[in-house]
Amino acid sequence: MPKEIDPFRFAHNGRELEGEIELTSLSRLKPSLFNETGTVKVKMRFDIDQTGTPYMQGQFVADLSLTCERCLGELLYPVTIETLLGLVKHERLVSKLSEQYEPWVIDDSEFVNPADVVEDELILALPLVPKHDFDCLPKEVWQSGDKEIEEKPEKQASPFAVLSALKSKK
């Protein structure tokens, strides 16, 4: 994968990119990973639609190694991301994009690193709380360890007991 591209020029020329990005090179994603080994398979197709909007259609496939929040062990999380990004030069132009596009804002920069948009999409695809689909902890861990004590409800005094005592004094 190239380190720098001009996405608008790629769109005008109808270019395609295909390659792999090492997970170790994605510095913002690394803190979320249990293990940084592996790659992301990347396919990007740049073009211009009928309305003249430059866009990038991408597919990113990876097996991410995350930390299970229950057992703190490794959780293999396969990800396949299909994205359609409309290219815009300024934040104020985002509202003019068709609803089918998510915005890719390219501020005052002619060249961008395609790995940055791949990293953004991977971060957005991470689960809020990664955990195994099965019970990854032994059953004894799921209990507090204290034996359950049956509580017998205490018989509460009637609020009218005082009146009853006054009545009996007469």
Image: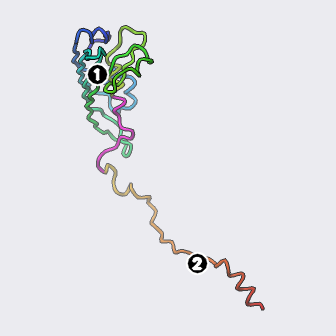
**Quadrant of image for the C terminus:** bottom right
Q: Secondary structure beneath disc 2?
A: loop
The numbered mark, 2 or 1, whose residue comes first in the sequence reads 1
- Residue 117 position, x and y percent, is 34, 21
| Residue at figure coordinates x 71%, y 81% from the top left | 162
The answer to the question of whether label 2 and label 1 lie on touching residues, with beta carbons closer than 8 A, is: no
Dot label at residue 155 = 2
Residue 46 occupies quadrant: top left
Residue 158: percent from left, percent from top = 64, 79
Q: Residue visible at 58% across and 78% down?
A: 155
Rendered position, 39 above or below 155: above
Q: For the residue marked with disc 1, what is the amino acid?
A: Glu
Image depth: mark 2 or mark 1 in front: 2
Per the image, the residue denoted by label 1 is: 22
Mark 2 surroundings: few (<14), some (14-19) or many (≥20) residues within 10 A: few
Residue that appears at 34% across and 27% down: 99
Screen quadrant of the N terminus: top left
Secondary structure, magenta segment, majority class: loop
Q: Amino acid at mark 2?
A: Lys
Q: Secondary structure at mark 1?
A: strand
Going 22% across and 18% down the picture, which residue do you hit? 19
Residue 11's label in the rendered image is none
Foreground pick, 87 / 145? 87
Nearest the camera: 8 or 137?
8
Q: Which residues are magenta?
A: 122-134
Residue 105 location (% of width, % of height): 39, 18
